[in-house]
Structure formats: C-alpha cells, structure tokens
Image (cartoon, rainbow, N blue to C red):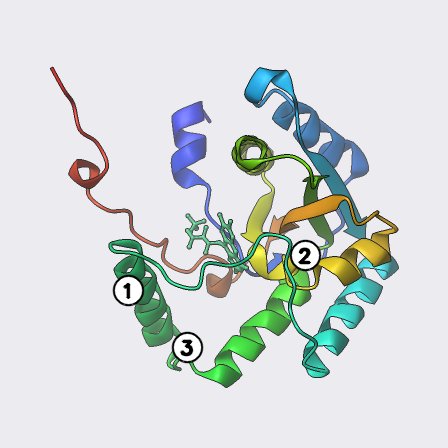
Amino acid sequence: MDAIECIVTRSSVRKFRPDAVPTEEIREIVRAAQWTPSYKNSQPWQVLVISGSRKDELTAMLLDLMDKRAEATPDLPPPREWPEPQDSLIRDLMDKRSALAGIDLNAPESVLRSKKANFRFYGAPCGLFITHNASLGSWSILDAGMFVQSLMLAAHARGLATVPQAFLTDYAAQVKEFFGLSATTRILLGLSLGYAADAPEAMPPRPERVPLEDVLRFFG
Ligand SMILES: Cc1cc2nc3c(=O)[nH]c(=O)nc-3n(C[C@H](O)[C@H](O)[C@H](O)COP(=O)(O)O)c2cc1C
C-alpha cells in the first residue's frame, strides 16, 4: 500500500478481535511514528501501552468513576461550542450514525453507552495513551497530533486498526495516578489498538469529507 492509499483507507474502528498484538509489532509502529516532524525536533510525545489484566483494571476504574458521576477533568478542555461549519458537520455525523443505529445517539443514555464502549477500548487488546510534559505549549500539541496520525497510519499499514479517543482522557487525574505519572504530565489522547473485528459494526460507513473546494484555495 502506498502512502496515499494508507491515508485514504485508514478509518476509525470501533469493534476489535480480542487477539493480542505482538509487542514487537507495537515497537515497530511507534519506531516509525518517531519519524514525525516536530518543532525544532523536540519530539514532545510519550506513549503508554496497556493490555491484559492491567487494562481490565483501568476499564473497571473508568466505569466506576462514570457510575459515581465523578467530574470529568481532562487535561485538554473539550470545546463547549463549535463554530460553523464544524457544528453542522458534527450534527450531520451524529444524525447519520443515529439513523444507522436506529437510536438517537445524542440522547443521554446513548452518550453513557458510548462512553462505556470507549472505556472498554471497544474490545481492543491494547489501550494507548499519548502524553507529554504539561509545561509544553500549543506547538507541541500540534506535533503530538501529527505523531498520532503517523502512529495510526503505521498501524494501518501493518494490518492493525485504531481509533483515537478523547473520551479516554476524561478522568486524566485518575489515569495519571493509575499509571504512577506525576501531575506535570498532560494526557493528550487515548487510542485503542488491535485487529478489526470481522463484523459490519467494526467499519460503519466512513464519515464523508467536505468538498475539496471548501478547504483548498490557490493564489496566483
Ligand atoms: C482528537 C480526536 C478525538 C476523538 N475522540 C473520539 C472518541 O472519544 N471516541 C470515538 O469513538 N471516536 C473518537 N474520534 C474519532 C473520530 O470520530 C473520527 O476520527 C472521525 O469521525 C472521522 O472518522 P475516521 O477516523 O473513520 O476517518 C476522535 C478523533 C480525534 C482525531
């Protein structure tokens, strides 16, 4: 698969086979992602990988926090409002997904169910957390975002599936305590990693992209 095909065919997978991912495979993917460019080659990213019974413990902790209605305190505050056209794009995605699922995915009980599935890593054998030093600024968050895309593309190229998950950062303080990380660490994003399940729900229709003309302008 060439680079363009890899970018275009990667998609978020939300149903995984339980099969373990060999450690060497994960090392290979992260080694490739390390070639991501970064501001002054600062390489502001760390990857935590969790699997097996430790992952189950983490899932149990996150579900418990949710059941107790613990306040979510992600290190990167979620946007309260979206400007246009993003607001419409998000509504459109949720409407289409709701129609497909036959339920209103914006309803509070659907949001809870979706959070639970996120906290269970959608059945994936591995959970990943991307972190960096909390004193780093916006450029480093941009670098880390590119790193995550490299990691997802490397995984895809090797037949592995991923989904990036902001939900996994909801209880950042507790997740840091779980991993024994200091408060000076910022949790940027969580991901699930594994092999896509052989089920239609694993690959729902890919969210569309806006027309090229909406994002690309040439001058001169
Ligand atoms: C920063 C970020 C956070 C995301 N958070 C979640 C999440 O919490 N749960 C989830 O199921 N998908 C999450 N996604 C996946 C997006 O919904 C998905 O990338 C988008 O709908 C486009 O679909 P595609 O990845 O299949 O191209 C997130 C994606 C990104 C980049």
* Nearer the camera: disc 2 or disc 3: 3
Q: Where is residue 220 in the image (x, y as percent from the top left)?
A: 11, 15
Q: In which quarter of the image is residue 49?
A: top right
Which residue is more in the foreground, 185 or 35? 185
User: Compared with residue 210, is residue 200 higher up or lower down, i.e. above or below?
Assistant: below
Label 3 environment density (alpha carbons within 10 Å; few <14, some 14–19, many ≥20): some
Q: Mark 2 points at which residue?
A: 124
- Circle 2 — which element? loop
Relative to residue 32, is residue 19 drawn left or right?
right
Task: Check the image and name the residue furthest to the left.
Answer: 220
User: Residue 37, can we see it?
Assistant: no
Q: Name the residue under label 3.
A: 106
**C-beta proximity under 8 Å, tags 3 and 1:** no
Which residue is more in the foreground, 88 or 32? 88
Label 2 environment density (alpha carbons within 10 Å; few <14, some 14–19, many ≥20): many
User: Residue 14, can we see it?
Assistant: yes
What is the distance, in whole Å, between disc 1 and disc 2 at their CAs? 27 Å
Which residue is rendered at x = 40% and y = 75% of the image? 101
N-term mark: 2 or 3: 3
**C-beta proximity under 8 Å, tags 2 and 3:** no
Q: Name the residue under label 1.
A: 92
Q: Position of residue 184 (x, y in %)?
A: 77, 44
Q: Position of residue 11 (x, y in %)?
A: 46, 47
Disc 2 marks a residue whose amino acid type is: Ala
Q: Quadrant of residue 122?
A: bottom right
